[in-house]
Image (cartoon, rainbow, N blue to C red):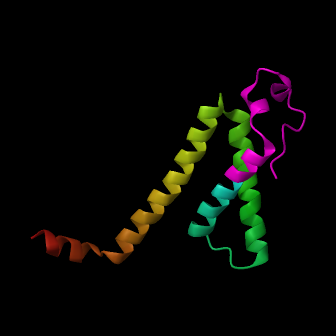
């Protein structure tokens, strides 16, 4: 579960957007990040899954700490997940469509 602040001065401000985001909401976001990571990175054994979990939690915490507001937080996480999906789709497309075959069809 992501830590809520760990004593950061930024998080003590009552007007800070971070105080409005519940631990449950953050955990749901970490779970979504995990789903994306599992689709694109091999994690066959429990150790691999543990590593992916740590990556997801650290990524969420970094974005949570550095985002200017909740919209920025959600945008940055969504953009990263979309980038992973896009890179994966492009890689799969390139692998299933060799260059020679592509050029042959364009004639």
* Quadrant assignment for the C terminus: bottom left
Specify the quadrant of the image occupied by residue 20: top right
Front residue of 52/99: it is 52
The residue positioned 38% from the left and 75% from the top of the image is 95
What is the span of residues highlighted in magenta in the rendered image?
A: 1-29
From the viewer's perspective, tell me whether residue 87 is left or right of residue 16.
left
Relative to 78, is 6 on the left or the right? right
- What is the quadrant of residue 67 in the picture? top right
Number of callouts in the render?
0
94 to 11, vertically: above or below: below
Can you give x and y, in whole percent of width and height, for residue 26 in the image?
73, 46
Residue 65 within the segment the image draws in magenta: no
Counting from the top left corner in percent of width and height, residue 15 is at 77, 20
In the current view of this chain or complex, which residue is farthest to the right?
7
Residue at left offset 72%, top offset 57%: 55
Q: Return the x and y of residue 35 as percentages of the image width and height.
A: 63, 63
Picture layout, residue 103 above or below residue 17? below
> Looking at the image, which is closer to me, 97 or 4?
4
- Outermost residue toward the left in this view: 107
Residue at 60 percent across and 45 percent down: it is 77
Residue 7 colored in magenta in the image: yes
Q: Is residue 7 above or below residue 40?
A: above
Q: Residue at x 49, y 59 (%)?
A: 85
Query: Relative to the observer, which residue lies in front, 104 or 83?
Result: 83
């Amino acid at each position: 579960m992501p830590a809520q602040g760990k004593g950061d001065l930024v998080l003590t401000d009552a007007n800070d957007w971070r105080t409005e985001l519940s631990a449950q909401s953050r955990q749901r976001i970490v779970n979504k990040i995990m789903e994306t990571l599992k689709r694109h990175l091999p994690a066959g054994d429990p150790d691999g899954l543990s590593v992916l979990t740590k990556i997801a939690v650290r990524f969420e915490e970094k974005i949570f700490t550095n985002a200017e507001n909740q919209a920025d937080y959600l945008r940055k996480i969504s953009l990263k997940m979309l980038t992973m999906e896009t890179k994966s789709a492009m890689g799969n497309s390139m692998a299933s469509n060799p260059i020679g075959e592509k050029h042959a069809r364009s004639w």
